Image (tube, helix red, strand yellow):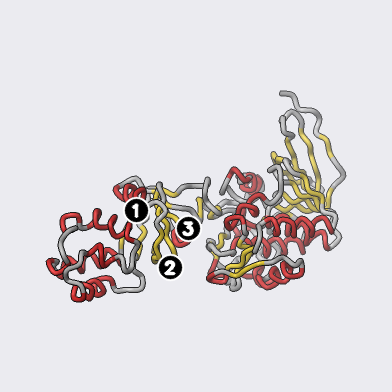
């Protein structure tokens, strides 16, 4: 196919690649300073990932945001941006726009009605300050001119023509690889590498686990069953709900611990985090010696789970009353309940991951402004950076904070 001669427009002051949370917030912030801003979104509409987040309600921030809520090879990098634009700042913006929200457990804040309220808020902020937004705008490459301006090459839908735009400040807010159906792509990493920046190891984060061994059969039989657990991996632990699926395990606690898991690692699951299970079962044996183990376990676990564990751990004693059990055997079951070690075969990958772990190495970025140290007026914000929040609104707060500080410096 033949390309026509590249078409150039007059330079923009700011071009932002990515019309998600970070990109739109950066655009509004920069435009409030009087900057001429263009947002380029590769999807057919802005904010797709926002619309799908939080079950359609968008967990837009958390009441208590701390640096400890983030994963990065440089745990200190996020501190400056988070302190410059806090969760309270965004909550104030939400309230100023009369957006109704509700607080759920652990300080999570959700839209009361629909995630579209957040997209509308961001859109209005951009429209009110004359931000230009282009959708279905696919970036092919970015180069830096000798003049210091940045050249952004776009391809049209049929890829038969090329359009070249120019700007004095360029912001890469293209996100990561998670949920490609909503626009996730590697263009941010491609741009970073083109400028000699390194990318830390990237992988799917906040994502369900899958199994290929005997645990898979158990999970399939328990699909839809939920239980409160503590999950641990590589010295990190989270407590909350776990959900069995036809592929493996999911739920908030599993999504959290997945950000600390590497292929080949084991995950320890405490199915009875409120008890020393061995002592608890011995007490139940004394109280109900004629009962079956699966029966007394239903006081603390779903009936289906107790039956599934029986088939896995004590099938030969399934009909034996507790009085017939040796205490040592009961203790061994208790140890399993408090420390069930499973080895996922993999995660469900980027298809269902909420975030991408890793990204542009923060060593090359100024923490106070998100500007590239080596290339003036080149910025990276949001998920494309090696900063990943825990579940609970922290990734959106990183989008607001990093987008805001970049918007002040473009």
The residue under the point 16% across, 55% down is 316
Q: Earlier in the sequence, mark 3 or mark 2?
A: 2
How far is disc 1 from disc 3 in space, using C-alphas?
15 Å
Q: Earlier in the sequence, mark 1 or mark 2?
A: 2
For label 3, the residue is 255
How far is disc 3 from disc 2 in space, using C-alphas?
11 Å
Residue 119 in the image, given as x and y percentages of width and height: 71, 56
Horizontal placement of 9 versus 253: left or right? right
Horizontal placement of 225 versus 371: left or right? left
- Residue 239 image label: 2
Residue 401 in the image, given as x and y percentages of width and height: 67, 65
How far is disc 1 from disc 2 in space, using C-alphas?
19 Å
Mark in front: 1 vs 2? 2
The residue under the point 80% across, 33% down is 6
Classify 10 Å Cα crowding around label 2: few (below 14), some (14-19), many (20 and above): some
**Residue 304 in sight in this render:** yes
Residue 276 in the image, given as x and y percentages of width and height: 29, 74
Identify the element where label 1 is drawn. Answer: loop
Q: Are marks 1 and 2 in contact (CB under 8 Å)?
A: no
Identify the element where label 2 is drawn. Answer: strand
Q: Where 165 sits versus 95, above or below?
A: above
Q: Which residue is nearer to you in this view: 303 or 42?
A: 303
Q: Which residue is nearer to you in this view: 309 or 93?
A: 309
Q: Quadrant of the C terminus?
A: bottom right
Q: Quadrant of the N terminus?
A: top right
Classify 10 Å Cα crowding around label 1: few (below 14), some (14-19), many (20 and above): some
Identify the element where label 3 is drawn. Answer: helix
- Residue 343 image label: 1
Horizontal placement of 314 versus 214: left or right? left
Classify 10 Å Cα crowding around label 3: few (below 14), some (14-19), many (20 and above): many
Q: Where 312 sits versus 153, above or below?
A: below
Q: Earlier in the sequence, mark 1 or mark 3?
A: 3
């Amino acid at each position: 196919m033949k390309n026509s001669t590249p078409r150039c427009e007059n330079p923009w002051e700011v071009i932002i690649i990515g019309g998600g949370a970070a990109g739109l917030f950066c655009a509004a912030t920069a435009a409030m300073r009087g900057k001429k801003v263009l947002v380029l979104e590769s999807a057919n509409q802005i904010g797709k990932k926002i619309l799908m987040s939080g079950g359609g309600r968008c967990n837009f921030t958390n009441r208590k945001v701390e640096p400890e809520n983030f994963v990065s090879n440089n745990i200190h990098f996020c501190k400056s941006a988070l302190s410059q634009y806090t969760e309270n700042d965004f909550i104030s913006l939400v309230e100023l726009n009369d957006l109704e929200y509700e607080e759920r457990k652990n300080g999570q804040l959700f839209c009361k009605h629909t995630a579209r309220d957040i997209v509308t808020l961001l859109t209005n902020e951009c429209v009110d300050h004359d931000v230009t937004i282009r959708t279905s705008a696919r970036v092919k490459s970015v180069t830096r001119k000798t003049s210091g301006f940045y050249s952004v090459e776009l391809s049209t839908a049929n890829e038969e023509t090329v359009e070249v735009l120019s700007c004095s400040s360029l912001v890469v807010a293209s996100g990561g690889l998670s949920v490609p159906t909503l626009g996730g792509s590697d263009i941010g990493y491609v741009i970073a590498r083109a400028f000699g920046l390194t990318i830390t190891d990237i992988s799917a984060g906040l994502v369900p686990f899958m199994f290929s061994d005997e645990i898979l059969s158990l999970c399939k039989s328990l699909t839809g069953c939920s239980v409160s657990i503590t999950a641990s991996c590589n010295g990190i632990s989270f407590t909350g709900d776990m959900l069995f699926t036809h592929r493996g395990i999911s739920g908030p606690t599993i999504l959290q611990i997945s950000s600390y898991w590497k292929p080949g690692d084991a995950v320890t699951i405490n199915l009875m985090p409120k008890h020393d299970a061995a002592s608890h079962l011995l007490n139940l044996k004394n109280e109900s010696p004629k009962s079956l183990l699966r029966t007394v376990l239903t006081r603390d676990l779903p009936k289906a789970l107790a039956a599934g564990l029986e088939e896995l751990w004590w099938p030969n004693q399934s009909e034996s009353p507790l009085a017939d059990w040796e205490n040592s055997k009961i203790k061994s079951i208790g140890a399993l309940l408090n420390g069930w070690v499973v080895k996922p075969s993999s995660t469900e990958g980027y298809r269902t991951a909420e975030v991408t772990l890793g990204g542009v190495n923060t060593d090359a970025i100024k923490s106070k402004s998100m500007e590239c140290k080596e290339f003036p007026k080149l910025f990276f914000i949001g998920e494309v950076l090696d900063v990943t929040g825990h579940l609970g609104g922290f990734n959106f707060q990183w989008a607001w904070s990093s987008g805001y500080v970049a918007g002040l410096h473009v």
